[in-house]
Image: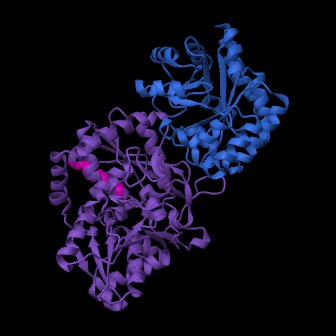
Amino acid sequence: MTAAPRIPAPADYQALPDAQGRFGPYGGTYVAETLIAPLEALTAAYTRLRDDPAFQQEFADDLKYYVGRPSPIYHAKRLSAKIGGAQILIKREDLNHTGAHKINNTIGQALVARAMGKTRIIAETGAGQHGVATATVCARFGLRCVVYMGAVDIERQKINVYRMKLLGAEVVPVTSGSRTLKDALNEALRDWVTNVADTFYIIGTVAGPHPYPMMVRDFNAVVGREARAQMLERFGRLPDVLTACVGGGSNALGLFHAFLNDRDVRIVGAEAAGEGIATGHHAASLSAGRPGVLHGNRTYVLCDDNGQITETHSISAGLDYPGVGPEHAFLKDTGRAEYVGITDAEALAAFHLLCETEGILPALESSHAVAEAIKLARGMSRDKLVLCNLSGRGDKDVHTIAQREHIEL
Amino acid sequence: MAARFAVLRDAKRTALIPFVTAGDPLPAASVGLLHALVDAGADLIELGMPFSDPMADGPVIQHADERALRQHVGIAAILGWVREFRQDDRATPIVLMGYLNPLEIYGRARFAAEAAAAGVDGVLVVDCPLEEDATLAPLRAAGLARILLVAPTTSAARLARAAAAAEGYLYYVSFAGITGAAQLSAADVAPHVAALHRIAKVPVAVGFGIKGAAGATAVAAFADAVVIGSALVTALAGAVDAAAACRRARAFLRPIRLALDQR
């Protein structure tokens, strides 16, 4: 499914992006002039904090004592035996505080916000996971929190809306456009440009204008660093394949980044193929989109022949986004990573299989990665290792699944 | 465009620049609306190219974009309207204003060639700042003026770069926010525009927050041009046919023109 590489591989994948925030032709700063000054201030602050040992120590402490890191790698033996191929290993990001990888990034950005003297935090959210993770850190740091959420998503994710309110956040419904994640992002950008003096915008994925794709990746890269060390310690070698689900792509880059220069490790991202790529009802920007510009960066986007961004579909609200982080676009075009589509039905089947064989209830987003891990393992011998990022737990999704399977709760 | 601004300067006339979203309120009204705006005193027209995700615009322009997109307004149709307008009006400069993705998908080189041939004078790509200037090289090469935005938050170093790179006119965004949000404060804006005049080779237009005659005349005291967008788009919304849209456009713009001329 992956097109032939169109960009030469760099000597060091981990040296990117460049000072302009570019990953080859992707990334950059495609924003209105009014956002340039706040982005420059953020870049300056983050560049300083990135090399500040005290900042990094505080971040590491929070990841350890508040989030509960490191998360283990679990050998899914019964699932592997059932598949009859490679061994499936699971990086348990679902065991983090708030139940997903999202908290790694929100803690990091809240620390940056505090260092910059900002007192008000805004965020966009689709499924509500990033909103909950943001509301959580705002409660902990004593920061005001406003979360923009599409009116359609608010209806689909009532529990998470209530969780955010319990944590003290204000949830603002967005009624423009398709009333989903992309519109929430537009609205958050508008708030930011209007209230930039006291407001910090915590973007939830590796997209947006520079420095967000780099900064969000850096904060999530702890996942791959841990996983790489855990693999060497417990298995004495690196995995043969990595897989993770890709919406905006933050959990995937979090896992992939530490392995990018390990060229023998195959990397596969699982996008939401929804009802099937051919039906047009999907959210597979890399598999079925084209290079364009959305939300401040050059990347693969889903749009029509007039360049208008199209509405997406996935059973999983967290993958329901018409763009993707620019670093993924770069990894696709260099051939370093492959991106494949997993349908709603495949993700659901994987969800049930993991529940029943391992007693782990994965998020619908993460179920896409599990489905791809199963497909990969099937074609590999028993001595091979597939490492799958289980980005979040599925408690939030039980209503969606019950409804889809016509079960009354 | 330079010729038009030279004439205005000699006549000591402040340029009046209305903004309308192409195809709104009705695609059938588009060409007539442009002529009506000129009739009512427009010296230059900014024509918005609708986009599904106009992140720098407020709700008024976003809703206008949504209405136009429901009527399938795209670049080819917009360039067709400009061509038709040019058959009767060779003098009034047209600036297309929009976002990058539709241009990317249309093809930047193709867009540049066709827009220049249709009689477009300049292009303002909202989400393409100086940092990404190379992206618009084909537009410059085709002779389309690269209109740049500057804002109250733009640093002195960037102002100098913008002043050097700007073509046509410099568009000063009167406050850090989105289109149509607030009423601008002329007293706050004046010193910024004065500073721009000292370094810019092109005229300075002021926009964002000008709702009518009072705001326009206040800005005219220090700016070369005033841009009025959201208030006009609001006035046009809901017009039932082309004649009604043109009537509303004239009724909105004429008093502003008169106030500017009597200043």
Q: How many marks?
A: 0
Q: Position of residue B11 (x, y in %)?
A: 70, 9
Location of residue A308 with respect to A115 vertically, above or below: below
Residue pictured at 64% horizontal, 39% vertical: B139
Q: Colour of chain B?
A: blue
Residue pictured at 30% horizontal, 54% vertical: A218
Q: Position of residue B181 (x, y in %)?
A: 51, 31
Q: Position of residue A62 (x, y in %)?
A: 18, 54
Q: Is residue A11 magenta?
A: no
Residue pictured at 43% horizontal, 74% vertical: A401
Residue pictured at 31% horizontal, 91% vertical: A81
The colour scheme applied to this rendered structure is by chain
The reply to whether residue A315 is in sight is no
Give, as a single range, the part of the protein colored magenta. Answer: A129-140
- Please state which of residues B155 and A130 is positioned toward the viewer in this rendering: B155
Instruction: Give the left or right position of residue A198, taking residue A399 as reference.
Output: left
Q: What is the chief secondary structure element of the magenta stretch?
A: helix
Q: Which quadrant is the C terminus of chain A positioned in? A: bottom left
The reply to whether residue A282 is in sight is yes
Q: Colour of chain A?
A: purple
Instruction: Give the left or right position of residue A293, taking residue B64 as reference.
Output: left
- Please state which of residues A268 and A273 is positioned toward the viewer in this rendering: A268
Quarter location, residue B217: top right
Q: Position of residue A408 (x, y in %)?
A: 43, 77
Quarter location, residue A350: bottom left
Q: Is residue A139 magenta?
A: yes
Location of residue A234 with respect to B27 vertically, above or below: below
Location of residue A188 with respect to B179 vertically, above or below: below
